Amino acid sequence: AQKITQTQPGMFVQEKEAVTLDCTYDTSDQSYGLFWYKQPSSGEMIFLIYQGSYDEQNATEGRYSLNFQKARKSANLVISASQLGDSAMYFCAMRAPPDGGNQFYFGTGTSLTVIP
Amino acid sequence: DGGITQSPKYLFRKEGQNVTLSCEQNLNHDAMYWYRQDPGQGLRLIYYSQIVNDFQKGDIAEGYSVSREKKESFPLTVTSAQKNPTAFYLCASSLAGEPQHFGDGTRLSIL
């Protein structure tokens, strides 16, 4: 069975500092995709970053980077230079396999608060 | 602009009543999904559809029904059999291998 685990219910970070949000996953598939989404208090889900299981380089998108450690089955999100607008819920998700079955699996989320 | 439109934004249900949540997309995506989110919780899959006229149950399908008569539309009906329907409902769509795109959600409450 596929499973996503986010062990940090809430995190605090000082403005302009970097923060790491943890995500571990469990799958028996060799081919899979990992995603991070941001959900502000207004409720919409915003796609942030994607990592494929065969990608050798860690994904980066602006201030977001994904620390992918395949052997440990972890896909942590790193947000650099935190801004007040980064305060939101963050969800890790997995799709397995990435080009076949279309089912996504979500973690329970981490609430990030950026402190001025 | 392409996107996913969910309506209404807020919905109230009386006891014993069925209500239907609308989800329309103009992204030409094949797959569409419905999720339920309870306060402080993650997303739980209700139903998903990979092609027109076909859909599969997710983890919490009991008390819900869907249809997929057109590629663009995937309405969700919350039936009276769903005893605890108060939640935030999110619709999403995707292409194979691509991230999901989400609508802005519908908040359903019981009167």
Image (tube, helix red, strand yellow):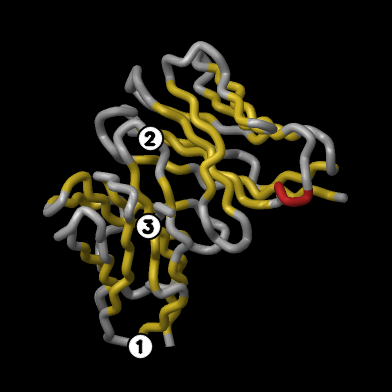
For numbered disc 1, what is the local secondary structure?
Answer: loop
Identify the residue shown where x is 40% and y is 75%: B8
> Whole-percent x and y of residue A3?
42, 35
In this rendered view, identify the residue nearer to me: A53 or A73.
Answer: A53
Between disc 2 and disc 1, the foreground one is 2
Amino acid at pointer 2: Glu
Of the residues shown, which amino acid type is indicated by label 1? Lys
Q: Which residue is mark 2?
A: B98
Residue A81 is drawn in which quadrant?
A: top right
Q: Position of residue A43 (x, y in %)?
A: 55, 60
Look at label 3 and name its amino acid: Cys
What chain is tagged by disc 1? Answer: B
Read off the residue under disc 1: B14
Q: Is residue A68 above or below residue B90?
A: above
What label sits on residue A98 in the rendered view?
none
Quadrant of the drawing holding the C terminus of chain B: bottom left
Label 2 vs 3, first from the N-terminus:
3
Q: CA distance from mark 2 to mark 1?
A: 38 Å
Q: Badge 3 is on which residue?
A: B91
